[in-house]
Image (tube, helix red, strand yellow):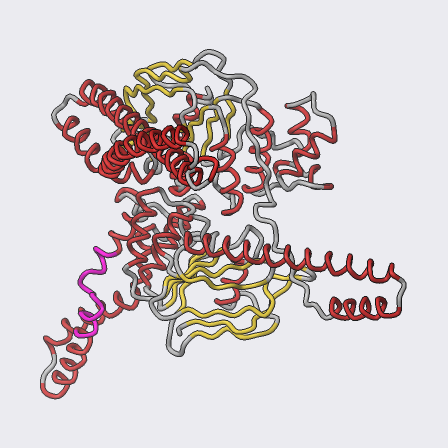
Amino acid sequence: MILSCHDIKKAFGEHVIVDNGSFHIEEHEKAALVGVNGAGKSTLLKMFVGELPCDSGSITLAKGKTLGYLSQHQELSSGNTIYEEVRTAKASLIDMETRIRAIEIELKDLSGEALEERLNTYHNLMNAFELSDGYSYESEITGVLKGLGFTEDEFDKKVDTLSGGQKTRAALGRLLLTKPDVLLLDEPTNHLDLHSITWLENFLLNYSGAVLIVSHDRYFLNRVATKIIEIELGTLSVFSGNYTDYAQKKQMLREARLKEYLNQQQEIKHQEAVIEKLRSFNREKSIKRAESREKMLAKLTPVEKPAEVHTDIRLKLEPSIVSGNDVLSVEHLSKAFPPHTLFHDVSFEIKRGEHVAVIGDNGTGKTTLLKILNQVLPADTGTFTLGTNVKIGYYDQEHHVLHMEKTIFDEISDDYPALNNTQIRKTLAAFLFTGDEVFKQISALSGGERGRVSLAKLMLSEANFLILDEPTNHLDIASKEILEQALNDYTGTVLYVSHDRYFINQTATRILELTGHTFINYIGSYDYYLEKKEELTNIYASEARSGSADTAAVSRSKQTWQEQKEEQAKRRKRQNNLKKTEERITLLEERGGEIDALMTEEEIYTNSVKCQELASEKADIAKELEELYLCWEELAEDDNSST
């Protein structure tokens, strides 16, 4: 093992972070630390690197091993450019290279023993330089920076001028290039686009050292992690496998514990009822038996009731009115911030009930599109039209829909004056704002808290067209799952921007990828998008190269969309036919069994007319079943081949 903690304890006053927690990380292992917001994940990482002390217990790093740590917030103020900052990770190699070049100059003026001694040093340095891939470190730096989403024209930007997200990416690049034996990463995907997240996944999968990740990105954890360490109510639990394996095992354990708890409660109630009855007999023997049972109950070790799942945010979205079938029509829309063009001459439609995810790299214009649709920004050219009775509910990741000078309570009451104090407090309590917290100013809230206020307003809006910009940012996994369930139950239409692939997989029925200044349409989930991405991107790229992108791309988009919709409709029809066939088979098989049972009854087998009727019915059933079995086999084969 390379990193371990044994019986560690940590508390801040009465708030217990971890109590007698233990786990270990093996060499080369990829592990994840999960838990709800506030459970203590970041605190644990800080304890591992010595930024916070344990109250008791021990944390051990194997002798001679190195630890690298990425915190959520970076303060880079070195005055370096991005490239120079990341290049510091290779300081030892650069120093070695400088010494090699210096010796090469010295060698010209040396002879005899001095020359031999210097040559020996030179050869040793060269061997060490080559073993450390010294000749490729410049290209390695460039590869990491590009993988994390920096373009070459950004390499010369000063780190002091970067946004918080850019600083985190630069710090991550520097850390990855130092190649420590153990990587501790706190929310490494927070500021990465889909392309960069995929790059980081592949980097970590091929990383020779061990990795411990704190992340709410379930798709990322499914791809990278082989062990999940959960922190819950001060307890550390270890599960083998990825996030999905953990979630399934966690649910099974919870169900088993709940069953054990309910069985014990039933037994306790039964014993208490028996004891009460025995005492009511008021006989010496009965009273002694009651006392014996009481002693048995006193010795019983109580089973704790498992904590309720998803008890944090309670979210239900419901439109006040039904919109028309045509919800949004976008025609020839363009937007640029010269010299950068975001998108050009794009057209698409959204129908009632669709859940459309907009994806693409950072800076391509996804958020700008939503702002145009909400009339926060004007388009350069083109138009968009909302359908009949469409009522928009907008969730803005920058929370411009909130008023910084207001309190949480006033933010709700001013927008929804028909609500009384009790109704407002009940709504806010559903989003974890209770007591005097409701009088906090919006400006004093964290990003996650502002997100919860925005979601509360969204829930009250009764909109039938939700436009959401990164709705899962700052939400923990449990809260994301609540939002997923709410959107899946929502009968209105949804258009959202997200980098959360797991969330997209759970909620999207269609994907619009913004790439090459246009939108490519995919009818299906994120996994379907991955299957079809290369094929459709190549089609659009070849059309762009031929100079006919404007007309051909639009027509191809409509054609491809139509083809996908038709294929999806065929697939649904096959699945419906398959389901109906299975239901008919079950019904006939049950009836066949009933006839067999009836034929054994005396009043039936002694009645020749009834026997003949049942025998005829049984023959008809057998004939229909034979046809249904063949039909089912064909439908099942077709359904399998189409997926």
Q: Nearer the viewer, residue 587 or 602?
A: 602
Q: Is residue 119 left or right of residue 483?
A: left
Predominant SS of the magenta segment:
helix
x and y, in percent, of residue 435 in the image: 73, 41
Q: List the single residue furthest toward the bottom.
A: 113
Read off the magenta span.
Answer: 127-140
Residue drawn at point x = 58 percent, y = 58 percent: 257
Q: Is residue 181 above or below residue 219?
A: below
The answer to which quarter of the image holds residue 637 is top left
x and y, in percent, of residue 263 in the image: 63, 57
Magenta stretch: includes residue 134:
yes
Q: List the single residue furthest toward the top.
A: 388
Residue drawn at point x = 61 percent, y = 71 percent: 55
Q: Is residue 450 left or right of residue 76?
A: right
Q: Is residue 557 visible?
A: yes
Quarter of the figure with the C terminus: top left
Magenta stretch: includes residue 562:
no
Quarter of the figure with the N terminus: bottom left
